[in-house]
Amino acid sequence: MGTLNQTPNSERLQITLFGRRNAGKSSLINALANQSVALVSAEPGTTTDPVIKAMELLPLGPIVLIDTAGIDDHGTLGELRVKRTYEVLNRTDLALLVLDATTGVSEFETEILKDLQTKKIPVVGVVNKSDLENYTKAELSSWEQNLSLPLIEVSALNKTGISTLKTAIIKAAAAVEPEISLVGDLIQPGDLVVLVIPIDSAAPKGRLILPQQQVLRDLLDHDAIGIVTKETELKATLASLSRPPALVITDSQAFERVSAETPLEVPLTSFSILQARYKGDLSKLIAGTTAIQNLKPGDRVLIAEGCTHHRQKDDIGTVKLPRWLQNYIGGELHFEWSSGMEIPENLAEFKLIIHCGACMLNRRAMLQRIEQATTAGVPIVNYGVLIAALQGILPRVISPIPEAKIPNQGVI
């Protein structure tokens, strides 16, 4: 099955298993997936880095199961493994807290449960190895009282209780934040929507990038008519239409030309701004633009991306954005970059965080990053919002989104 036929992991419900070493988390992953996914051993600490398995769980649909290292690991390497485990909290939609039936509840379980509850992550409690002879079911009630959490007895080895656990997962998933529409709630069935997609050296050969695919699919799901064109053909495309489009959506890097060639009465936005709404908090990202006018030469700026990719000659994150921002302030800034699932801990040292569209992160992960920036007192924007602000068209390109607000301080 090709990549275009698979649901991206960022669009799947992220279910993470937490527990001590040798609680049977990896065996439980294999039982839930009904196949050998995670490495299993009687030796404690077998799982070192998070292991991800994409699967279908009906009626939920596509999900991701994440196996983690034991929260009781120790030593220099063990502490690094635990740190990786706790980092997974930031992208977890639903947690399975796995207890070993032979050891019960300890401070490790109560501590991770406290963190999960602080982050408002729904939790399903599981007692694994319930088939072992030295497991006394009478202890179950005291464990539940200790955690204030119902516990489901399972045996990953014998696959007993797995069906009950799946039912509990499905029920708990109802508490996860409901899905937000990408573009479908901004248009009506039958509307014409023009998608402006530049094809340059950065465009992947033979395919569209994920945000473009997602917008096109969402338009089809909402019975709209999607018309795809390049920025060089936009004027001819608009002239050929029998009626004006309800919306024009462009790659943010083509804002200048597309804005000039799209009549003012035609609503305009970008893939990146739609992603900011879909994956994060658009109002906070817009508010971050007010900090740009206060930047001074020498200030530190973090450019964060949710994925790792091969950098092109004129890369947006490492070349274009730094150039545009430095031209605006009239001096050199000190840029630093991060990519993938981790983000620096020293956020308070930066004057501004510029984030990508986050198409490879799930919504919870992006919201956590925005919250981290807010806690550190650092303004955060995303690529599309920043580009629109620098070009003076931010009010126009957020106008199609009813809930988008310009802060009282205005924009640059």
Image (cartoon, grey):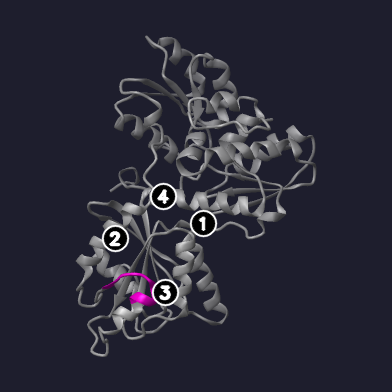
Q: Name the residue tied to disc 4.
A: 10
Q: Name the residue tied to disc 3.
A: 47
Q: Which mark is residue 341?
A: 1
Q: As rendered, which of 114 and 352 lies closer to the eye? A: 114
Q: Is residue 149 magenta?
A: yes
Residue 324 on image: x %, y %? 69, 34
**Which label's residue is closer to the chain start, 1 or 2?**
2
Instruction: Indicate the quadrant containing the C terminus: top left, top right, bottom left or bottom right.
Output: top right
Residue interval drawn in magenta: 144-152
Q: Name the residue tied to disc 2.
A: 169
**Which label's residue is closer to the chain start, 4 or 3?**
4
- Between disc 4 and disc 2, the foreground one is 2
Contact? badges 4 and 2 (CB < 8 Å) = no
Helix, strand or loop for disc 3: loop
CA neighbours of label 3 inside 10 A, class few (<14), some (14 to 19), many (20+): many
Q: As rendered, which of 313 and 12 lies closer to the eye? A: 12
Residue 147 shows up from this direction: yes
Residue 27 on image: x %, y %? 30, 74
